[in-house]
Image (cartoon, helix red, strand yellow):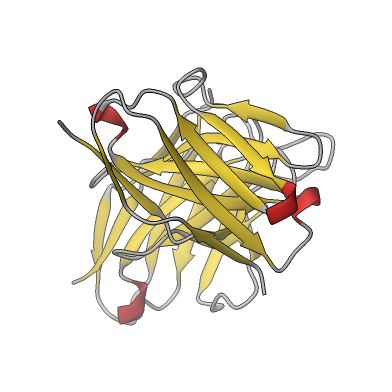
């Protein structure tokens, strides 16, 4: 069974760094892309970026390029979404999800990680 | 970026009746290389992550009830719930995966009338 299990709720202050994780199991981690999707409170879904653990290829949405970094550790089949300096506007639910290819749909989703950034 | 526009923003349908959601893309999402429409539909219930319903515009994901169907081609698509059930109350999103970034529609909230 494919499972994506995300790390827990985070409460941070502006300017702090953060790393949230997505532990993947039940499939060959190296041969699927992992994507991240943002959902601000009460709002819709935003495609943040994708990452291919097999060769570390990645792509980011224009609004997110340079603002976040997606990475993965193949030894523990875990993907990460990282911020070096959080803003209040980063407050949102973040979902990881699996894709078969860079131009593919999200077929399995994590449960979400709520990130709150407030002074 | 390809802009995805859904209509309506919300709709209320009686139990057992049909619900229809439309999705338009700002450019075609039909690929000439595989002759497939790169369009997916997701269902998101309150407090839950999105769930894949339909991909390639009309292929139902395994386990999805057959009252859900997708149609359309090029830049115009439709999600139909043939007989609305109480458990179908949710927000529905279309998404194009023809280009990066894989943009989503703004969502359509389906409620019971």
User: In the figure, is residue A90 to the left or right of A94?
Assistant: left
Q: Is residue A13 above or below residue B93?
A: above
Residue at left offset 28%, top offset 80% = B15
User: In the figure, is residue A51 to the left or right of A54?
Assistant: left
User: In the figure, is residue B54 to the left or right of A63?
Assistant: right
- Is any part of residue B72 visible from this angle? no
Image location (x, y in percent) of residue A28: 79, 59
Residue B20 is drawn in which quadrant? bottom left
Residue A17 is drawn in which quadrant? top left
Q: Could you tell me how many numbered marks the image carries? A: 0
User: Quick one: quadrant of the C terminus of chain A?
Assistant: top left
User: Quick one: quadrant of the N terminus of chain A?
Assistant: bottom right
Which one is nearer the viewer's eye here, A111 or A103? Answer: A111
- Outermost residue on the right side: it is B33
Q: Is residue B1 above or below residue B83?
A: above
Residue at left offset 65%, top offset 42% = A72
Q: Is residue B17 above or below residue A52?
A: below
Which one is nearer the viewer's eye here, B113 or A110? Answer: A110
- Outermost residue on the left side: it is A119
Which one is nearer the viewer's eye here, B89 or A79? Answer: A79
Which one is nearer the viewer's eye here, B68 or B43? Answer: B43
- Is any part of residue A62 visible from this angle? yes
Residue at left offset 79%, top offset 49% = A30
Image location (x, y in percent) of residue A77: 69, 54
User: In the figure, is residue A18 to the left or right of B89?
Assistant: right
Residue at left offset 47%, top offset 24% = A64
Image location (x, y in percent) of residue B41: 52, 55
Image location (x, y in percent) of residue B53: 54, 64
């Amino acid at each position: 069974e494919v499972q994506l299990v995300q790390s827990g709720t985070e409460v941070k202050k502006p300017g702090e760094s953060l790393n949230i994780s997505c532990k993947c199991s039940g499939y060959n981690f190296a041969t699927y892309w992992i994507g991240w999707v943002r959902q601000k409170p009460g709002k819709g879904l935003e495609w943040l970026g994708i990452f291919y653990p097999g060769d570390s290829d990645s792509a980011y949405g224009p609004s997110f390029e340079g603002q976040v970094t997606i990475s993965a550790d193949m030894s523990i089949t875990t993907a990460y979404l990282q911020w070096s300096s959080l803003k209040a506007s980063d407050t949102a639910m973040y979902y990881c999800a699996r894709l078969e290819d860079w131009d593919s749909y999200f077929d399995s989703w994590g449960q979400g990680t709520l990130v709150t950034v407030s002074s | 970026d390809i802009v995805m526009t859904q209509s309506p923003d919300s709709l209320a349908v009686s139990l057992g009746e049909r619900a229809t959601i439309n999705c338009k893309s700002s450019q075609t999402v039909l690929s000439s290389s595989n002759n497939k429409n790169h369009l997916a539909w997701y269902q998101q219930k309150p407090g839950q992550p999105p769930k894949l319903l339909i991909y390639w515009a009309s292929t139902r994901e395994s386990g999805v009830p057959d009252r859900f169907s997708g149609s359309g081609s090029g830049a115009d698509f439709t999600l139909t719930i043939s007989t609305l059930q109480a458990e179908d109350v949710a927000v529905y999103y279309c998404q194009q995966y023809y280009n990066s970034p894989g943009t989503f529609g703004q969502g359509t909230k389906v409620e019971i009338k």
